[in-house]
Image (spheres, rainbow, N blue to C red):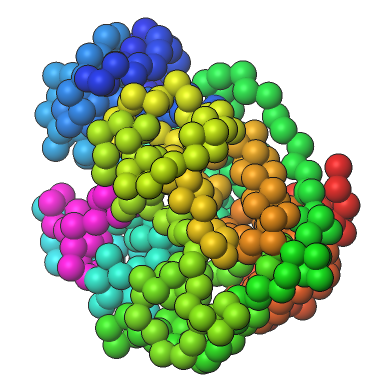
Amino acid sequence: MAVIQVNDLTYAYPQGRSVGPCSFTVEKGEFLHVTGSSGCGKSTIARCISGLIPHIYHGKMTGEVLINGRSTLSTRMWELSELAGFVFQNPSMQMLGNTVEEEIIIGLENLGLDRAEISGRLEESLGRFGLDSLRGRDPQTLSGGEQQKLALAAITSRRPPVLVLDEPLSMLDVSAATELTRYLSLLSRSGTTVIAFEHRADYLSSLPGVRVMALDSAASVKFSRRRASASCPDCKCGAKPLVISNICVNAGKTRILENMSLTVQSGSVTAIVGRNGTGKTTLLRAITGLQPFEGSVTVNGKKPDFGLVCQNADLQIFNAAVRSEILYRVNNPDMKLYARLLEILGLGRYENTPPLILSEGEKKRLALATVLIRKPEHGVLLDEPSLGQDAAHKHTLMELCAEIASTGKTVILTTHDLHLASMADRIVVLGPDGVTASGRTEDILADDSIWARAGMFVPGWITEDERKGITA
């Protein structure tokens, strides 16, 4: 008998959105990679397999899901949690502990393990996911990638026979994502059933024995790069560089940024990359003034006006419908721009839909629309914009960023997706000591010594054309 059986499954949320029907099985020790376009229902199916649907989400479910022959409908949630461990797409949603250490211990205590076993598993998990130095930190003060590592550590330490992972690589740097996929492959070969719903297929495609299941037939898109800076040189648009001078940021007793200085040219798209916890999100928050800091951040000697799209889109979405979310408190909105944003960002059919039932990728695009409708003077900041996005939407995003930059504004994005970064005009690499390097994309991607100093590497599936900045 298969470990997982999904039979004629459909699910409709109370607000009307639905997925299915679908049927499939997963065998013991199998590694299943589930792909599909943004919004096709991957997270919904993951919730059904883990039992969150129908026990937590109360829409209409038909068909059945069986784990080891037991129906998720009739099995209590605490029993299902021992059969299948689930890592959310948004890891902050499953943080319960006051410290990193406590977050892992809670799940182990719930299994009734003795103190010696708990201590051993705790140390193993902290070491495996590089969290030992963070063991006393409040999980809510961690970066998105560090939270993702913690969620993975907490769930895998319980050693469930089935792992259901919703975009487990989305916020991990190259090194962490590579290490995780190797670990998941090892677990699978040891008998753990792994089901990963994931857009970043490059990390999984080379693993032995991984089966791919596509939920839809979305066409693949080849990344290309339209040089924003070439269409808007500073002499034409007027130089409005963002100047960051000696900024310092603390999170409690932890120093996140130390005397960081950086100048970002206007009329260009700049990608900021770096290992998890190097301060990428903190830097964007400081630029907008959301994060207190020492030092100065200016454009033409004044406080800048940037729109920020948060890494966690839930932080900036609170209205009852997509339309009201985008137009919220916008005086004399540009309705032509509104209509265009709906079309470009694939939100037209959701105009009257409650934002919080959208997929994570759709929420990110909605958050971007709420920023762009306000036409911030100096540009936009996007924190991990590729989260939840398929290849087609990533391509659209970068075309839109290039268009914004062509008007003389500054576009800065943080990302762990080096395909995405390769389409930017410039790359800033952050390392343990701040800015490791800053320069043209083709120069940064071609210099392996830069990545080594930052504790990273450019994986082999980044093509030579991408390294050289050749546009398709």
Q: Residue at x 65, y 39 (%)?
A: 396
Count of numbered labels shown in the rendering: 0
Q: Between residues 311 and 198, which one lies in front from this camera angle?
A: 311
Q: Between residues 162 and 175, which one lies in front from this camera angle?
A: 175
Indicate whether 427 appears above or below 406: below
On the image, the x and y values in percent for residue 212 come to: 58, 28
On the image, the x and y values in percent for residue 446 come to: 83, 67
Q: Left or right of 80: which side holds 356?
A: right
Residue 16 within the segment the image draws in magenta? no
Q: Which quadrant of the rendered structure holds the C terminus?
A: top right
Indicate whether 203 appears above or below 148: above
Indicate whether 377 appears above or below 277: above
The magenta stretch is 91-111
Indicate whether 398 appears above or below 31: below
Q: Residue at x 37, y 8 (%)?
A: 8
On the image, the x and y values in percent for residue 44 come to: 35, 27
Q: Left or right of 303: which side holds 142?
A: left
Residue 92 within the segment the image draws in magenta? yes
Quadrant hosting residue 62: top left
Q: Left or right of 433: which side holds 90?
A: left
Q: Which quadrant of the rendered structure holds the N terminus?
A: top left
Q: Residue furthest front?
A: 332
Q: Residue at x 46, y 59 (%)?
A: 308
Q: Left or right of 180: which side holds 357?
A: left
Quadrant hosting residue 114: bottom left
Q: Between residues 267 and 457, which one lies in front from this camera angle?
A: 267
